[in-house]
Amino acid sequence: MSGRPAFRRHLAETRYGQLHLRTLGEGGTPLVLLHGSASASGSWTGLAPGLAGERLVVMPDRLGCGGSDRPPRQLSMAEYAEATLDALDTLGIGCFDVVGLHTGSCEAIELAVARPDRVRRVAVVEVPVFTAEEVTAFKARYLTHPAPAEDGSHLLWYWRWWTVGGFAGSAPRLRRWPLELVQEWAVEHLSQLPEFWWPYHAAIEYPTAGRVGAIRQPLLVLSTGDDLVEQTGRARELLPPQAEIAALPGFDDVTCFFAWTPDDAAAVLAHLRLFLA
């Protein structure tokens, strides 16, 4: 279709399996966009064109997601970050900027702390700092999914995850999604079974509180009104002194904004363009 951005696809070897990436644009300091859990790089395709005017934008599928291989075992966030670096090496990318969303925020923080020689600037959508009680409770919730039913009725659970809210409505969705987007994400969710919860657990177990303060690069935190606003509030006193916080309380469902309604994300684009210049 004319007018559609010309995303390019790549497949890179990593120490944990092959990783699929999409790229758009060229030149400048490359920008790496890291998606949340139960999704894939397609969640950035609405926002990416607004960031790719004069630079290369890179959107990996985390291992186990999208077109990437399933890892041989459950990985830690540090290991997911290693795989991303392996893939960037294959593309010949040295220094880069990184933006992370939810689970991607944890990976972005890890990349910045582990490889300050590679990461120039860091922007994250929420900084999830979980209490010990939340770690236990959230990990238990993210093991939950129904067994296959002969009549296919179990598939409604996944549909409700993306329409009503996670866990079949127990984590309410604040904004009604277009049904085309619901279908796309429900199919992606299903494709990650039975280990769809592995990246969630890596993010929940990640020691964000002890790592985010070690970031020495410029750091932008986009604090929205979504389901991690409470956890991000705990992170405020832990942020390094150079961190900037941009409050965007109206963005109560950032996933939908980025994937489907990029025009509504103009404020996000404005913050990112200014910060990443």
Image: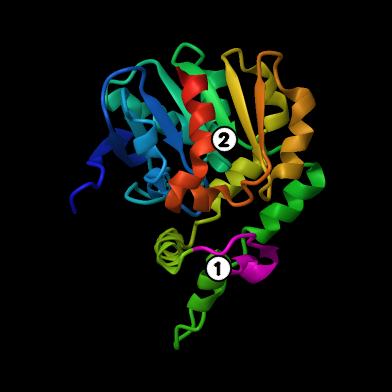
**What percent of the width, then of the height, locates residue 42?**
38, 49
Is 56 included in the stretch rendered in magenta?
no
Work out whether residue 7 or residue 204 is closer to the camera in this orientation and state it.
7
Mark seen at residue 163: 1
Is 171 included in the stretch rendered in magenta?
yes
Is residue 220 rendered to the left or right of residue 236? left
Is residue 233 rendered to the left or right of residue 143? right
Outermost residue toward the left in this view: 2
Q: Which residue is depicted at the point 51% across and 18% down?
A: 121
Q: Is residue 228 visible?
A: yes
Q: Which residue is depicted at the point 68% across and 39% down?
A: 128
Query: The disc labelled 2 sits on which kind of residue?
Result: Ser
Distance between mark 1 and mark 2 Cα atoms: 24 Å
Placement of 273 over or under 178, stated as above or below? above
Q: Quadrant of residue 11?
A: top left
Q: Which residue is mark 2?
A: 105
Query: The disc labelled 1 sits on which kind of residue?
Result: Thr
- Magenta-highlighted residues: 163-177
